[in-house]
Image (cartoon, rainbow, N blue to C red):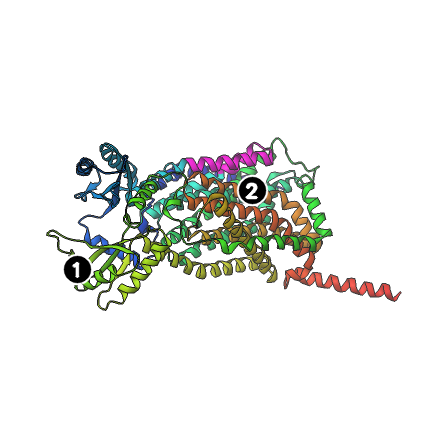
């Protein structure tokens, strides 16, 4: 097979040069993306929720947009002295010279037990990445009070802890993910150049995706947070590697029967591009379905993640083939495939697995179903009511220690009061109703100069201190009661917000999102699979097995989170994120398997086709699953429980899909059911005709 010299060399070289230029020019944007990232709470709330409207309305009551830092002193001898209280007041007053600190600090308030005291400092809300430095300056001034231990808490401290958690995400997370993937590829393929080429393509794709996300975020078209940035890195590296492995494995297989790398690449590209594009499409459209979410954090991940997968597809289908044409067999050095070893692409272990499936299909799929159903049985134990502040960070966090001190010495909700906005004309009945609400320990209207209630555009603001900790179930019940009481006051137009109310609204939005988005994602995947496999029953079978695997993963996660990690609950978004990632990515491996099984079945029949498909794809799909699981596991380097939960669920779920569902359950079901699973495609018709022929021949033999 010959080709014009321009096709053979100029086009591949041009593609490589274009991607090198993209990597050189846009690669730095992976590091710059944090410049346009935001970790403010308002960026994650439901846009239409009551607590969000309160947060927006609060701005009118502040001369400048501020967030509080709560300073807590604990007396080492168990009792706060007058000198210590006076020293604390002087320490707060000295903070007015600290950058970003604004306004007059609150008076120092002693605790009821006399063992602690606290004060509030207002910090400009645009503190951003300077929050850790500001908190350190506040703590440094507060530590001048002798005989006391100092903690700094409140929203400013929480923001500082988040900033420190995401610090270096562009280097640390990327370095860990790339190192893990490279190590696995070197161990599995025992090749030097191919792993480097695949990783290079993944890094180029990440640079392109980061640049696009940066430009869109800079224009306020999309929102990028630290967690969105981290998931983007993982998605692009993992997906690029998976797609690259599938294409390079098919190229290696074609090289075993070809002497010229160009036709081998073209054949490999033609026979694998459909599966790769379909695989990427399930993830892209699954992520875009997050745009239907009421949670801003979910909507932020949707388009950014879809951009990342699109760039991964583009790199895998252009950069990698071009490099493989130029390198040829050298890409697999030192184990180069040769035409005289046509079976070199197969693995004996998968031939044995295929033989076992052929002999005992029903026993195997029944055993797999029992295991998955047993795991899914524990799913109801997974609590999704939200992670309490004490479990938000993995390891020690200053904001958590401060909140623990507040809870010990002050009313549980002192650090995070409920915020009520009401018409000023109904302020008295609102205050009275709030004071009489069970679970409320204090009510205080926001005042202006002279001690009168502050009124802005006919509205007044009231701070309601809860008896229970702001992240507790008791506090949520109190806020629900408070909303019920205040909403019933005619003409007040009262709205209840604050930390606890935000948690309630986020949970409600997450419940609604699962109800809406999960069916949409399933419908999208079924449509893509139907178009790819040209069957109606096979897509249903594949989606059903992956959904069962997802439920089993959640069941296992419920046990691991409770008894190993000690988490009392998960973030409300974890279940939806896990569904989108696991179902879309889990279907990927079934797509890789069944597209090859369909190709083989057209030549050898359904029974042999699925066994041959498993044999020739077993190694590469397993490697891809291990790589993706390891890539998501890299999220644990960021000390946030949300990302640790996502990392475990996706990593475990991908391995379960790869090693059990794709390797055993699906092939065994297809082998046992026969051609009916391909209804109404040509494979079903051929299988039916073959069955009729066998029955006719059997009758003829009996007649003789």
Foreground residue among 167 and 205: 167
Residue at the image position 22 percent from the left and 65 percent from the top: 492
The C terminus: image quadrant: bottom right
Q: Position of residue 654 (x, y in %)?
A: 54, 47
Quarter holding residue 8: top right
Mark 2 in CB contact with mark 1 (< 8 angstroms) = no
Q: Position of residue 172 (x, y in %)?
A: 42, 35
Local secondary structure at mark 2: helix
Residue 485 painted magenta: no
Q: Looking at the magenta stretch, what is its main secondary structure?
A: helix
Query: How far apart are the two marked residues, 2 and 1, measured between alpha carbons?
Result: 59 Å
Q: Is residue 67 left or right of residue 294?
A: left
Q: Position of residue 192 (x, y in %)?
A: 56, 31
Foreground residue among 485 and 615: 485
Q: Which residue does the numbered mark 1 point to in the structure image?
A: 457
Identify the magenta region.
172-200
Foreground residue among 627 and 455: 455
Local secondary structure at mark 1: loop
Residue at the image position 68 percent from the left and 54 percent from the top: 601
Query: In the figure, 400 relative to 291: above or below?
Result: above
Foreground residue among 252 and 187: 187
| Crowd class of label 2 (few under 14; some 14 to 19; many from 20; radius 10 Å) | many
The N terminus: image quadrant: top right
Residue 197 painted magenta: yes
Q: Position of residue 357 (x, y in %)?
A: 70, 50
Q: Which residue does the numbered mark 2 point to in the structure image?
A: 626
Q: Is residue 638 left or right of residue 441?
A: right
């Amino acid at each position: 097979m010959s080709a014009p010299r321009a096709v053979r060399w100029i086009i591949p070289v041009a593609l490589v040069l274009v991607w090198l230029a993209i990597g050189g020019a846009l690669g730095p944007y992976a590091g710059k993306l944090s410049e346009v990232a935001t970790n403010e709470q308002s960026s994650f709330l439901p846009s239409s929720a009551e607590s969000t409207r309160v947060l927006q309305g609060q701005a009118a009551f502040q001369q400048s947009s501020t967030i509080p830092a709560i300073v807590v002193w604990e007396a080492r001898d168990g009792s706060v002295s007058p000198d210590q209280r006076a020293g604390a007041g002087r320490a707060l007053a000295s903070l007015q010279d600290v950058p970003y600190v604004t306004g007059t600090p609150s008076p120092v308030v002693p605790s009821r037990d006399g063992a602690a005291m606290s004060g509030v400092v207002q910090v400009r809300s645009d503190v951003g990445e300077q929050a850790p430095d500001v908190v350190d300056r506040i703590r440094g001034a507060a530590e001048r009070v002798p005989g006391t231990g100092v903690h700094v808490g409140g929203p400013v401290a929480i923001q500082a802890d988040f900033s420190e958690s995401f610090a270096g995400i562009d280097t640390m997370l990327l370095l860990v993910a790339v190192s893990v993937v490279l190590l696995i590829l070197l161990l599995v393929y025992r090749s030097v150049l191919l792993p480097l080429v695949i990783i290079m393509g993944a890094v180029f794709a990440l640079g392109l995706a980061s640049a696009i996300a940066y430009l869109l975020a800079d224009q306020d078209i999309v929102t990028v947070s630290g967690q969105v940035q981290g998931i983007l890195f993982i998605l692009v590296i993992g997906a690029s590697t998976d797609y690259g492995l599938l294409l390079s494995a098919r190229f290696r297989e074609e090289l075993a029967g070809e002497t010229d790398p160009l036709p081998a690449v073209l054949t490999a590209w033609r026979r694998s591009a459909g599966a790769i594009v379909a695989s990427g499409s399930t993830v892209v459209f699954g992520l875009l379905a997050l745009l239907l979410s009421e949670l801003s954090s979910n909507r932020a991940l949707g388009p950014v993640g879809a951009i990342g997968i699109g760039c991964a597809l583009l790199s895998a289908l252009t950069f990698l083939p071009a490099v493989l044409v130029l390198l040829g067999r050298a890409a697999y050095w030192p184990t180069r495939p040769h035409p005289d070893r046509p079976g070199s692409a197969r693995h004996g272990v998968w031939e044995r697995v295929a033989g076992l499936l052929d002999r005992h299909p029903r026993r195997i799929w029944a055993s797999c179903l029992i295991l998955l159903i047993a795991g899914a049985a524990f799913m109801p134990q997974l609590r999704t009511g939200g992670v309490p502040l004490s479990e938000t960070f993995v390891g020690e966090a200053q904001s958590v220690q401060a909140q623990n001190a507040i809870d010990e010495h002050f009313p549980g909700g002192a650090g995070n009061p409920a915020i009520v906005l009401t018409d000023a004309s109904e302020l008295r009945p609102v205050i009275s109703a709030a004071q009489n609400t069970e679970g409320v320990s204090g009510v205080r209207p926001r005042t202006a100069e002279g001690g009168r209630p502050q009124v802005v555009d006919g509205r007044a603001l009231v701070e309601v201190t809860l008896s229970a900790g702001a992240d507790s179930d008791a506090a949520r019940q109190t806020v629900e009661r408070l909303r019920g009481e205040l909403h019933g006051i005619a003409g007040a137009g009262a709205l209840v917000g604050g930390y606890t109310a935000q948690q309630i609204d986020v949970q409600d939005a997450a419940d609604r999102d699962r109800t809406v988005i999960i069916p949409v994602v399933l419908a999208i995947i079924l449509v893509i699979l139907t178009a790819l496999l040209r069957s109606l029953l096979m897509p249903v079978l594949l989606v059903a097995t992956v959904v069962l695997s997802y439920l089993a993963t959640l069941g296992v996660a419920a046990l691991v989170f409770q008894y190993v990690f000690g988490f009392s609950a998960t973030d409300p978004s974890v279940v939806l994120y896990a569904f989108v990632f696991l179902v879309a990515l889990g279907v990927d491996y079934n797509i890789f398997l069944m597209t090859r099984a369909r190709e083989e079945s057209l030549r050898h029949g359904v029974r042999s086709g699925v066994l041959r498909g498993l044999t020739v794809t077993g190694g590469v799909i397993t490697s891809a699953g291990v790589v993706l699981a390891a890539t998501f596991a890299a999220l644990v380097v960021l000390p946030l429980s949300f990302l640790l939960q996502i990392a475990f669920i996706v990593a475990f779920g991908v391995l379960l899909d790869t090693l059990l569902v794709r390797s055993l359950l699906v092939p065994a079901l297809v082998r046992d059911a026969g051609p009916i699973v391909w209804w109404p495609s040509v494979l079903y018709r051929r299988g039916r005709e073959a069955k009729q022929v066998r029955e006719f021949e059997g009758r003829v033999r009996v007649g003789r």
